Amino acid sequence: MTGTQFWPGRKVVVTGGKGFLGSHIVARLERLGAVVTAISRRTGHDLRVLDQGMRSFIELQPEIVINCASNQGGISYQRMYPGEIYYDNLLMGANTMEAARLAGVRKYVNIIAGCAYPGEPRDGILREPKHQGEVARQVANGRIDLAKRNPHETLS
């Protein structure tokens, strides 16, 4: 079975699916035929609270949960709020994983919360506006270079 044959009809929840990275994953999975629901604080799901994740997964009964939920921002934001960002992301990661386990979700994919950039900048200095369009293109094409992922691998 090829990757494109796997997705049609699969019930998938993408946490953080309205955000920067998650919205591109939702779009790609929909093009592949998956039945995708995006949940986030924007849709009334605060995944820092375990019960909210549980209710969502029990109600939606996904086969797969892809966790893209995160508290993120640019480099300046991360320098200003490192503790809050760390704590929120710790809660969201642990709560979505536990809620998925308790709800009987068959597969849980955790995309590590962190800034996503298209590889190393030439001079070693990240300039966010320069990268935003390129990152979006790479995510949309399934070629984002994320932690623990082969940068040459693509979503089928």
Image: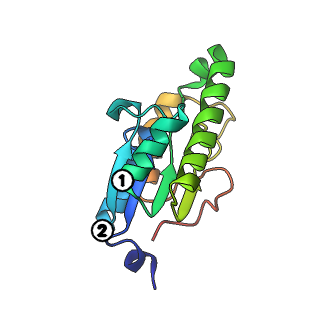
Residue drawn at (53%, 26%) of the image: 73
Q: Which mark is residue 60?
A: 1
> Disc 2 designates what residue?
33
The residue closer to the viewer here, 55 or 117, is 55
x 60%, y 28%: residue: 88
The answer to which of 66 and 22 lies nearer the viewer is 66
The tally of labels here is 2
Residue 148 placement (x, y as % from top left): 69, 55
Residue name at image x 59 percent, y 49 percent: 97
Label 2 environment density (alpha carbons within 10 Å; few <14, some 14–19, many ≥20): some
Up/down of 63 relative to 72, above or below? below
Colouring rule applied to residues: rainbow
Residue type at numbered disc 2: Gly
Q: Looking at the image, is 136 positioned above or below residue 6? A: above
- Disc 2 on helix, strand or loop? loop
- Is residue 125 something that shows in the picture? yes
Mark 1 closeness class: few <14, some 14–19, many ≥20 residues within 10 Å: some
Name the residue at 56% across, 53% down.
102
Which element type, helix, strand or loop, lies under badge 1? helix
Please identify, in this view, whether the residue under mark 2 or under mark 1 is nearer the observer.
Answer: 1
Which kind of residue does numbered mark 1 sit on? Leu
